[in-house]
Image: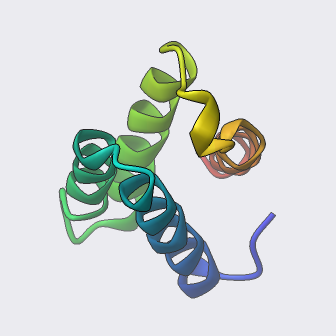
Amino acid sequence: MFANNKEFFENISLLIEKIEAAGEIQWGSELRDAMNISFMPGEIFGAIRMTLTKFQNTKIPAQLNIEKEINEIVESLNEIL
């Protein structure tokens, strides 16, 4: 769980950087778009959860090594939403 929204969004930004650094630009772009969908936190959280759930249902390239991070973020969002 994250202490506050700032910590949450910083964590998402780091995840985007990690995804893009591994060459998965489209995945990074989808997550970045989810972060910028609205000014309302609930809508942003919902879009991020939807995008990460999509990633969970897709074969994540092994070199990303982000399954644990995605699961933790989705669990946190499920508690919030």
Quarter residue 71 falls in: top right
Q: Is residue 50 left or right of residue 64?
A: left
Q: Is residue 4 left or right of residue 22?
A: right
Residue drawn at x 67%, y 50% is 73
Residue drawn at x 34%, y 43% is 24
Residue drawn at x 39%, y 35% is 51
Image position of 14 with respect to 7: above or below: above
Q: Nearer the viewer, residue 36 or 80?
A: 36
Q: Count up the numbered dots.
A: 0
Horizontal and vertical percent position of residue 17? 43, 68
Q: State the quadrant of the N terminus.
A: bottom right
Horizontal and vertical percent position of residue 34? 28, 51
Quarter residue 75 falls in: top right
Image position of 36 with respect to 74: above or below: below
Q: Nearer the viewer, residue 72 or 41?
A: 72
Q: Nearer the viewer, residue 67 or 45?
A: 67
Image position of 17 with respect to 53: above or below: below
Q: State the quadrant of the C terminus.
A: top right
Colour approach in the figure: rainbow
Q: Is residue 16 left or right of residue 74?
A: left
Horizontal and vertical percent position of residue 10? 53, 80
